[in-house]
Amino acid sequence: MPRILVVYGPNLNLLGEREPHIYGRESMQEINAKLAELARREDAEVEFYQSNSEGAIIDRLHAARKDSDAVVINAGALSHYSYALRDAIAAIQIPVIEVHMTNVVARGEFRSTLVLAPACQGVVYGFGANSFLLGLRAAIEVARDRAAAPPRGS
């Protein structure tokens, strides 16, 4: 059974009330309920983690290398400038799917730069809260594919 960690970065704890004209009216808890239901249907485990602190997110990603098969992350603004977070993703050597609710490349110059993306397995953006569902589906499939793959060198 794949174990997927879903990570929310700065300010995402305010989903549903933060700029609803941009991010919609669904709260993080409502999105988590949908993700938990999808994981149940797909016979996967899902854990949720949110922090407004870059260092805490890095610490949780480091721990994920031992307790998770894949990660879905929306790092918020950190996605656009945190090379420390990018390096943590590269270091943990498990698949990471980056998600964004909005079409970030259409929202201005600084948001179109995604420094985490090169270290991630893939990126999903522009589908509102459904970006998380699509990211979770991808993470589950990638984790299953990795589990089914023969060991390197065999």
Image (spheres, rainbow, N blue to C red):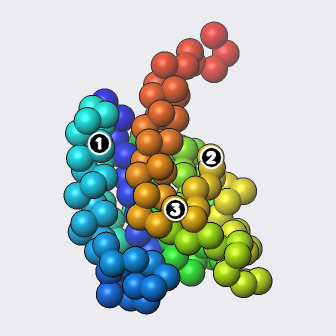
* Sequence-wise first label, 3 or 2: 2
Which image quarter holds the N terminus?
Answer: top left
**Image x and y of residue 58, in percent:** 48, 67
- The kind of residue tagged 2 is Gln
Where 18 sits versus 105, above or below?
below
Check disc 3 and report the residue beneath it.
127
Whole-angstrom CA distance, mark 1 to mark 2, is 19 Å
Front-lying residue, 39 or 82: 39
Where 24 sits versus 130, above or below?
below
User: What residue do we see at 29% from left, 42% from top?
Assistant: 39
Q: Nearer the viewer, mark 1 or mark 2?
A: 1
- The kind of residue tagged 1 is Ala
Where on the picture, by quarter, is residue 10? bottom left
Check disc 1 and report the residue beneath it.
39
Q: Residue furthest front?
A: 21
Whole-angstrom CA distance, mark 3 to mark 2, is 18 Å
**Image x and y of residue 109, in percent:** 76, 83
- The kind of residue tagged 3 is Phe
Check disc 2 and report the residue beneath it.
121
Which image quarter holds the C terminus?
Answer: top right
